[in-house]
């Protein structure tokens, strides 16, 4: 395999292809394993997993990634046994395979350079071997098996007493044979041990004395288990062919002597040309001329998809963004000059506008990925949570094909994970409690996604106990947050989203540390989305997140201060109204407030946030009530300009970070307008209030 | 005239490695992702040699060889299996289907070229 190493394993393009391919295979394998019903395993599914692991093994072997091919080989053995139906599939098989898949993933990451330390494949390999050896799903006691153990070369002589203790210990567990002990630096300790225990147990005993990486444990054939050693098969070369090709290599075999083959071929070729049938296979249509080369991509699979680096797409999105802006600048100028000349707008311009919007939509669609990219990780999470928590959980998903901007997918994944965790941990009851309540012992968590207009709605629903209103109220009171006892549910649930809030009676490892829901809400709001909670006592909780389809375009409200235009995300605007100076009150300890139907909201003058903009002399024209992080503030501006879609540009990459702004956009007159950071505004009001309260 | 070889493997990295070895030796190579795709290409033109993986979705290597041998134009063409599977039973199936030879993965580039050259030089 050394030649293979030098030919392909030098970190070149082949490794890159392999990494991507292995990743795809491993994700598909994990998904299939999670779907697999041990009671009625689908042969197709098992075959597909087998092929994926088989592929990984083959290429890893070529590239010299031996630890990957070794583990994949054992993985494949187990799959082969299961797909042939030699015994029923046990849950333990699925567990062992999921673990092995994780290790292979880590091994791939290590080879790719994403992981510093190489993962230890031995435990995963040992548990796979155990499953290969296992007789059936009930985990029937393994029969006596013989392992050949070889430890060394030793770095230094071992403590004689320790070594003696280990050997005595093993002799008690089973029988020792063929002992050979050379207890010195560079020496080996080798023996065969026959025992009933599992390979992993044996390894753990050995590890007490010698580091696992120096230890090799091989199951000996003749035991009850099928041999798992690599296929031996020396090159059994056909006698005639051997003379023609002296070095065939192991496993290679020719079924016909090349000399003879060529002679026959010439004879046959002569015969076919004599009959005039030519070289065509079937009567080809002119389009299928024999020398008509297929395009280079012919080897690629159906569906005709290609891989493109995300930064290239981002660049395209950006360029189209610029184009949209240029187009609107042009249209506006044409409208103005055309209007002055009494000519109207040039005819082509309307087409340009339409084409530009279509182009933008098409380009943004490239970056759209199905939400199944996120949903697909939850079966595993739920499976693990349910076994840790001793709950029975069924996870259902719908609307997986709903598409979202890639950037958004990344940002909703953590909040969504948190919600699913909460649903299983806090939402669902234990099977006993469910039965006692007359419910199915198996709880259900459902994930659903759907597109509504320019937004995507994502729902996490459980059929658990529902939110405990009384406890939330009590907990709110403890934390000094007063909520009227007769407040509507909606208002009570809002408390959940405050930092540091948790009603979990026991803080578990998984959730309930009082961080979380506030982060969920902050993340979603920062995307211009919303979070809603509906709870039905005894019947469960539904949490609905609504996020925009894309982050590249935003529905916005534009406001002005002096001659400058500012942009507010429409999603965070509650209302706007003209303000009479008499409605502004300076309350002690609270600063300036605006009376909105009895609620005194903190006031922020936009001119204070951006002092450079010239405020109109009578500066308090319009108040825009904005909401973020569960708080509201009244933003005072000169005037409302309008509502429009804006193309979001990053300030950091184009200029520098501006406090109080999340980005910028270019208006149709070519001027730059800042997009205001609403959560920053609300924070400012909060801290100003806090400062006043302290003084 | 440049000899043409059809490389069939569902594993993209493996396919690329085989192609690269053959291309550096001066062969013109086409690729197919499984037996069905290979058969489609093979119906359009006759390659001088086919190297196919055994375990593939839709149509495996031995079935592909059987199908190719049923095309008269493929009568004189060398058909090689390249597989991690080396068990004698499967090899026998390959031989009966009409395979010209069997090569084991992981393969040694030089050995592969030696074998290929023996059939098309």
Image (spheres, coloured by chain):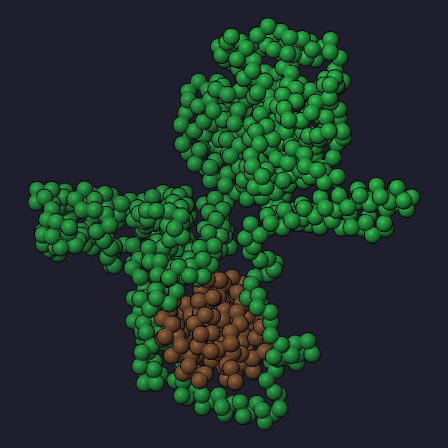
Chain colours: A green, B brown
- The foreground one among A196 and B63 is B63
In percent of width and height, residue A503 lies at 48, 18
Can see residue A489? no
Figure quadrant of the N terminus of chain A: bottom left
Residue drawn at x 57%, y 90% is: A272
In percent of width and height, residue A593 lies at 65, 12
- The foreground one among B102 and A526 is A526
In percent of width and height, residue A670 lies at 72, 40
Left/right placement of residue A358 relative to residue A153 reads right
Residue drawn at x 33%, y 58% is: A66
Left/right placement of residue B109 relative to residue A307 reads left
- The foreground one among B103 and A95 is B103
In percent of width and height, residue B7 lies at 49, 71
Residue at the left extreme of this rendering: A160
Please tell me in which quadrant of the rendered image residue A444 appears.
top right
Residue at the right extreme of this rendering: A342
Residue drawn at x 39%, y 75% is: B112
- The foreground one among B116 and A649 is A649
Residue drawn at x 88%, y 41% is: A340
Residue at the top extreme of this rendering: A588
Can see residue A226? yes
Image mark count: 0
């Amino acid at each position: 395999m050394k030649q293979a190493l030098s030919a392909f394993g030098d970190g070149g393009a082949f490794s890159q292809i392999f990494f991507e391919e292995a990743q795809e295979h491993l994700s598909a394998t994990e998904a299939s394993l999670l779907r697999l019903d041990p009671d009625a395993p689908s042969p197709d599914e098992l075959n597909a997993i087998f092929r994926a692991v088989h592929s990984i093994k083959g290429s890893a072997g070529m590239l010299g990634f031996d630890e990957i091919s070794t583990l994949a080989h054992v993985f494949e053995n187990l799959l082969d046994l299961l797909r042939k139906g030699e015994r029923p599939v046990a849950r333990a098989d699925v567990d062992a395979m999921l673990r092995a898949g994780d290790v292979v993933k880590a091994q791939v990451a290590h080879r790719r350079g994403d992981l510093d330390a190489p993962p230890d494949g031995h435990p995963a390999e040992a548990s796979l071997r155990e499953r290969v050896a296992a007789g059936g799903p009930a985990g029937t006691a393994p029969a006596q098996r013989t392992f050949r153990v070889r430890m060394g070369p030793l770095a230094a002589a071992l403590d004689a007493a320790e070594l003696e203790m280990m050997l005595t210990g093993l002799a008690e567990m089973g029988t020792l044979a063929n002992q050979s002990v050379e207890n010195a630096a560079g020496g080996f300790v080798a023996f065969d041990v026959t025992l009933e225990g599992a390979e992993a147990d044996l390894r753990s005993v050995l590890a007490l004395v010698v580091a696992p990486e120096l230890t090799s444990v091989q199951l000996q054939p003749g035991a009850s288990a099928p041999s798992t050693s690599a296929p031996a098969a020396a090159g059994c070369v056909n006698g005639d062919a051997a003379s023609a090709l002296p070095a065939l290599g192991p496993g290679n075999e020719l079924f016909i002597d090349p000399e003879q083959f060529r002679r026959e071929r010439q004879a046959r070729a002569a015969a076919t040309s004599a009959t005039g049938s030519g070289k065509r296979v079937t009567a080809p249509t002119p389009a299928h001329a024999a020398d008509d080369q297929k395009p280079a991509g012919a080897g690629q699979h159906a569906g005709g998809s290609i891989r493109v680096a995300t930064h290239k797409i981002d660049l395209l999105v950006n360029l189209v963004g610029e184009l949209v802006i240029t187009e609107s600048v042009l249209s506006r100028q044409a409208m103005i000059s055309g209007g002055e000349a009494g000519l109207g707008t040039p005819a082509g311009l309307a087409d340009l506008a339409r084409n530009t919007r279509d182009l933008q939509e098409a380009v943004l669609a490239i970056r759209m990925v199905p939400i199944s990219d996120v949903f697909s990780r939850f079966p595993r999470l739920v499976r693990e949570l349910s076994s840790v928590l001793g709950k029975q959980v069924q996870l259902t998903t719908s609307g997986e094909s709903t598409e979202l901007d890639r950037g958004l997918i990344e940002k909703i994944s953590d909040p969504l994970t948190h919600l699913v965790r909460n649903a299983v941990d806090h939402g669902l009851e234990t099977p006993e409690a469910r039965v006692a309540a007359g419910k199915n012992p198996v709880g259900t968590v459902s994930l659903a996604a759907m597109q509504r207009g320019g937004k995507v709605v994502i729902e996490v629903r459980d059929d658990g106990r529902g939110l405990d209103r009384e406890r939330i109220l009590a907990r709110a009171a403890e934390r000094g947050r007063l909520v009227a006892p007769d407040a509507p549910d909606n208002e009570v649930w809002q408390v959940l989203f405050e930092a540091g809030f948790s009603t979990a009676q026991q803080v578990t490892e998984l959730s309930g540390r009082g961080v979380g829901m506030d982060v969920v809400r902050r993340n979603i709001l920062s995307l211009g989305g919303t979070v809603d909670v509906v709870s039905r006592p005894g019947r469960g909780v539904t949490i609905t997140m609504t996020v925009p389809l894309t982050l590249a375009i935003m529905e916005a409200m534009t406001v002005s201060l002096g001659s400058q235009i500012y942009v507010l995300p429409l999603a965070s605007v509650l209302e706007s109204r003209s303000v009479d100076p008499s409605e502004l009150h300076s309350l002690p300890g609270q600063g300036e407030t605006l009376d909105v139907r009895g609620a005194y909201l903190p006031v922020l003058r936009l001119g204070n946030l951006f002092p450079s903009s010239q405020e109109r002399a009578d500066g308090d024209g319009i108040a825009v009530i904005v909401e973020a992080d569960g708080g509201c503030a009244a933003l005072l501006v000169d005037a409302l300009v309008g509502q429009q879609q804006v193309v979001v540009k990053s300030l950091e990459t184009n200029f520098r970070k501006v406090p109080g702004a999340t980005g910028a956009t270019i208006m149709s007159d070519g001027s730059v307008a800042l997009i205001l950071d609403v959560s920053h505004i609300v924070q400012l009001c909060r801290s100003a209030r806090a400062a006043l309260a302290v003084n | 005239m440049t000899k043409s070889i059809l490389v069939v493997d569902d594993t993209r990295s493996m396919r690329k490695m085989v192609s690269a070895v053959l291309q550096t030796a001066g062969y013109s190579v086409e690729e197919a992702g499984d037996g069905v795709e290979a058969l489609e290409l093979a119906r359009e033109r006759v390659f001088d040699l086919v190297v196919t993986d055994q375990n593939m979705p839709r149509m495996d290597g031995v079935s592909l060889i059987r199908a190719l041998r049923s095309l008269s134009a493929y009568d004189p063409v060398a058909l090689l299996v390249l597989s991690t599977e080396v068990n004698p039973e499967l090899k026998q199936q390959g031989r009966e289907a009409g395979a010209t030879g069997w090569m084991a993965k992981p393969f040694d580039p030089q050995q592969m070229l030696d074998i290929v050259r023996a059939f098309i030089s």
